[in-house]
Image: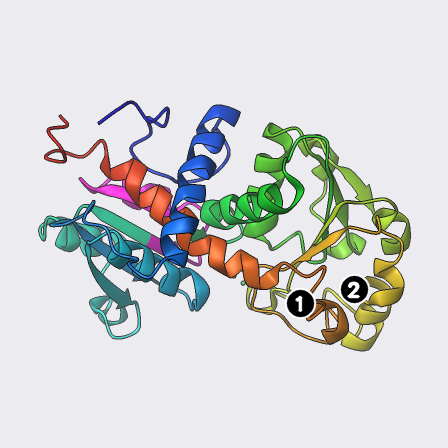
Amino acid sequence: MTDTRFQHRHLLGIQGLGPEEITTLLDIADGYVEQNRSVDKRKNLLRGRTVINLFFENSTRTRTSFELAGKRLGADVINMQAAGSSVQKGETLIDTAMTLNAMHLDVLVVRHPDSGAVKLLSEKVNCAVINGGDGSHEHPTQALLDALTIRRRKGRLSGLTVAICGDVLHSRVARSNIHLLNVMGAQVRLIGPRTLLPSGVERMGVEVFHDMRRGLEGVDVIMMLRIQNERMRGNFIPSIREYFHFFGLDQAKLALAKPDAVIMHPGPMNRGVEIDSDVADDVERSLIREQVEMGVAVRMACLDVLTRHLPNRDGAA
Ligand code: ASP
């Protein structure tokens, strides 16, 4: 197997990846988009491989798309929810990992409510680990699928201005996207109320706006974020109504962005809270459906590159 220019054993975050590595993943994913649109969607690249999706938090898109991605590459895929597993009976994360390890799996996809938990697991297992979202830390495959969606529509990432709006404080999607867009040469603006933007965020190389109208002026891409109630302790916004008035994306605010600006959302969307239905369903400008499609292709690319370094595939070491 040829050198993939992606030499990492795990995919734990975007932080630390260089532009070449990101481009490699996006290029490989682009090929899988075509495969997924054809009648015969199945390849045998991962035949004999076992992928386990270990999810300690709810998920719709990420878990399903990892499952589809693994199956389309010919792997055996098993889904484990923390509810229903021994974790509920008090087993530690490490014991769970050791149990899974003894089953000789090849790839473990993990989602966990605590930042850093996926890295900890990766240090204890023999297989490749993919971070499916850890607390408010990182969600690397979301940032990669967002990048692929933008690149396919705009033809590039470099030189674009991307606004990330809403609950940045609790968002792993925002953090991964900030790293990726910075590395790829895009300009990032963060828009939100003071209570929902991390302090010192300017040090991440972004521009900060508390006035959404000003922040949206002339942007190419608008990424909306959900209010992450499950990670909040205390009140961060006065009321949903007020939040939507100031920070919800509607046609009037959208008109301030470039005429060809596109709208994105990682899902799940809360219509009428951070985004108006008119905008979310705008067939010309909303890329929310494409994001889901790109998610499968990106996860296929991640499984592909990470298994290239495992023993016994096409004579690899
Ligand atoms: N689905 C994304 C995540 O898991 C975004 C969200 O939940 O709002 O982080």
Q: Is residue 63 left or right of residue 277?
A: left
The magenta segment is 110-131
The amino acid type found where label 1 is placed reads Gly
Which dot, 1 or 2, sits closer to the camera?
A: 2
Work out whether 22 lies above or below 192. Answer: above
In the rendered image, the quadrant that contains the C terminus is top left
Residue 193 percent location from the top left of the image? 80, 56
Report the residue at 79% width, 52% height from top.
194
Between 155 and 289, the residue placed more toward the observer is 155
Residue 103 percent location from the top left of the image? 9, 53
Report the residue at 38% width, 56% height from top.
36
Dot 1 or dot 2: first in sequence order is 1
Image colouring: rainbow
Residue 159 percent location from the top left of the image? 72, 31
In the rendered image, the quadrant that contains the N terminus is top left
Work out whether 207 lies above or below 213. Answer: above
Q: Quadrant of residue 228?
A: bottom right
Magenta stretch: includes residue 111: yes
In what element is the residue under mark 1? loop
Q: Quadrant of residue 311?
A: top left
Magenta stretch: includes residue 220: no
Tell me: is circle 1 under 8 Å from ligand 1: no
Asked if one can make out residue 157 in the rendered structure from this viewpoint, the answer is yes
What is the distance, in whole Å, between disc 1 and disc 2 at their CAs? 24 Å
The amino acid type found where label 2 is placed reads Leu
Report the residue at 59% width, 43% height from top.
177
Q: Is residue 24 left or right of residue 251?
A: left
* Label drawn at residue 249: 2
Label 1 crowding class (10 Å Cα cut-off): few <14, some 14-19, many 20+? few
Work out whether 71 lies above or below 107. Answer: below
In the picture of the structure, the residue carrying the numbered disc 1 is 234
Residue that protrudes farthest toward the front in the picture: 39
